[in-house]
Image (cartoon, helix red, strand yellow):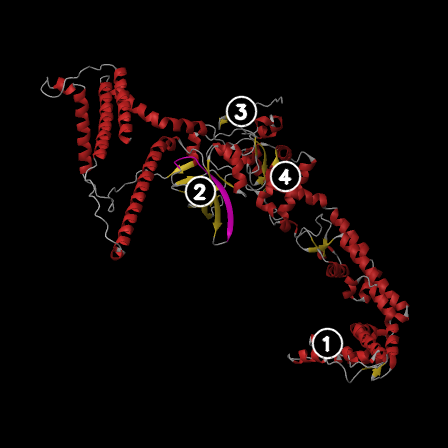
Amino acid sequence: MSTSHAWKFFRAGGFDQVSLETGADMMALDQLDKKLWVALACPTTGLHFDKRTLSLIDTDNDGRIRADELLAAIKWTGGMLKNADDMAKRVSPLPLSSFNDATPQGKQLLASAKQILVNLGKKDAQALSVEDTVDTTKILAQTAFNGDGVIVEESAADEATKALVRDIIACVGSEADRSGKPGISQAKVDQFYAEAKAYADWQGKAEADPAIRPLNEGTDAAAAIFGALKGKIDDYFARCRLAAFDARAVGALNREEKEYLAVAAKDLTITAAEVAGFPLAQIASNKPLPLNEGLNPAWSGQISQFAAQVVKPLLGAKTAITEQEWQGIKDKFAPYEGWNGAKAGGIVEKLGLKRVREILAGKGKETLAGLIAKDKAEESNVASIIAVERLVRFTRDLRLLCNNFVNFKDFYDRGEPAIFQAGTLYLDQRSCELTLPVEDAGKHATMAGLAGAYLAYCDLVRKGTGEKGSIVAAFSQGDDDNLMVGRNGVFYDRNGKDWDATITKIVSNPISLRQAFWMPYKKLVRMIEERVAKRASDADAASTAKLQAAADATATADKKVPAAAAAPAKKIDVGTVAALGVAFGAIGTFLTAVAAGFVNISKFGPLALVALIIGIILVISGPSMILAYLKLRKRNLGPIMDANGWAVNARAKINVPFGTALTGIAKLPPGSKRDLTDPFAEKKSPWPWVIGILIVLALAYWGLNKQGLIHKWTSGRMGHKAATEQTTGTNAVKTVDAAVDAAATTANEATK
């Protein structure tokens, strides 16, 4: 992509990154080839960044910030400011003089900003902070009309309209207004009036047809008790008809004696389910239903109400009713049941028919529609108030996001941590600054393991609050000797909160060259320790077995025939002695050859000896250091962040010097004083040193004597004359090699 802007780049992480120093740099980002961007997308979660700002940038609400969304936010913000450098300087609070009032939209934003300050009681303020725009509810609390199409009680000018708003909310519910108060929209108004009309029409049908209310005002109460008993009375007369058909069924129709025995065995109440399930009265052929005597105790109260509210108004005072009279009662209530089953507008019934008809007859619906339209007319003004929040936030935050998206300046300059760094993990006398939040450690490690870094996944918990979380931490200095699953540390997040951290998973990779240097020696020590421990364990097992055998033999000594005395073991095994002698001889030959080699090389001066020692060290540690170096030079941040949902567009290297800066190791403060006296230190004996020095002197004498140097230095008074003078470094090396081969052959023969 061609560009007329003069860009500046800085080198960090092994690649070139664009420098964003001015507002012009930021405004020209749409001209910069996206291949030069460090990232092309990032998630809106798991970042130490203002979540509200991220949500405003994320215009498609997919939970990700993409390059085009960031460019759109920068372009819009720069256009609303008189000087785009305010973005680069992260100006906050934003002065009113910074608004670009040369454009219609900028002028509208400035007016809205002033209105916000007025609503907040700061009409004389000359700058607007993010905090001033945070609480939209507070800003709009004093505004009756706020453009959301929802009106509140205070939106009405007269008491009648306010009462109507309250009635609508009571019947069909409310919607939250931008002011935070309960209100109603046009949809709620339409729903209420539709329900009110349906209810009024339904009630009108009853008024137009006298058959629907046979008992006039008492019909509703009578219909309620009628409906409650209808099924039970139908059951009674059906049983009586069956008894008339066959007298043998009477006993079964009245329930058997054993059923009464089961009920009698319990504590009885007249409302017990067992009793309520029995017939209303004793069954007999074509028997009328008694209304005051001989009734099932569980139903006697309701039957009394039925007689008073239904039978008496329709049939007069009676002590019993026949099945034909019962059918007549059902016929009387049939129109009511049909009408009541088609009930409509029930949600407004609580207002009463009179109030419903009063509302329908009035002009309230038109009044409310006018108020709602007036509220919607303010939509552009309120949108402008929200746009002010965007401008204030974007001016403050876009530069920060660019320095963690377009480039990784904040990560590499070692100043303020990058927005993706979660905090600092303290564990094993180290502080790890490269930490990221994770949701699924197993899934994350699959990708992050390709970074070539030593990663420790930790579960976090704050027991005081029950909060939990997970992080991944990169260890880039020190060694891994004491890093293992189950180790505990403390994690401090970017907000200063401390968490208990426990390692749950490790992705092992080289940590440092120092670790690689000592690795062969540590492996040798571990191998020796393991072999010694195994030999000791085997010896202990053998000793235990012998003791057990001896104990068994002692316990059964009086039950066994004495065995013939075993031949006494030889005190000295000649073969063993010979093997030991050969072995010691081989060792002596090897040490002699080594000493001779050092002596011969010493003829070339002290530098040759130093070179020889360095060479031996490199032979031992070199391979592991080379392998570690090859892996460390490939270590990069990309896979770790990609596993967290980023789209990293560059190989952001974490080389050895930078990795060392990301992980701190415990050091004593400058000027500290140390007391090296340890009251529990092991007492040191001089004998190991004395013996070691004597062995070295003996080997030195032996080697020098083999070379004839003792004989030469003492003018023939001591030592042996060398058979052949070795004067070249090549011959010295051959001597060492031959001695080593001879020692190895002798050792093998001794082993056989």
The nearer-to-camera label among 3 and 4 is: 4
Do labels 1 and 2 touch, CB within 8 Å?
no
- Label 3: which secondary element: loop
Do labels 1 and 3 touch, CB within 8 Å?
no
Numbered label tally: 4
Residue 289 position by quadrant: bottom right
The nearer-to-camera label among 1 and 4 is: 1
Q: In this picture, which residue range is highlighted in magenta?
A: 466-479
Pointer 1 or 4: first along the chain: 4
Amino acid carrying mark 1 in the image: Ala
Q: Position of residue 161 (x, y in %)?
A: 77, 59
Q: Which residue is mark 3?
A: 8
Residue 151 in view of the camera = yes
Q: Residue at x 51, y 36 (%)?
A: 448
Q: Which residue is mark 1?
A: 276
Q: Position of residue 689 (x, y in %)?
A: 19, 35
Pointer 2 or 3: first along the chain: 3
Where is the N terminus found, in terms of image quarters?
A: top right
Disc 4 packing (10 Å; few <14; some 14–19; many ≥20): some
- Label 1: which secondary element: helix
Q: Which residue is mark 4?
A: 58
- Label 4: which secondary element: loop
CA–CA distance in space, label 3 to label 4: 28 Å
The nearer-to-camera label among 4 and 2 is: 2
Pointer 1 or 3: first along the chain: 3
The nearer-to-camera label among 2 and 3 is: 2
Amino acid carrying mark 4 in the image: Asp
Q: Position of residue 325 (x, y in %)?
A: 87, 78
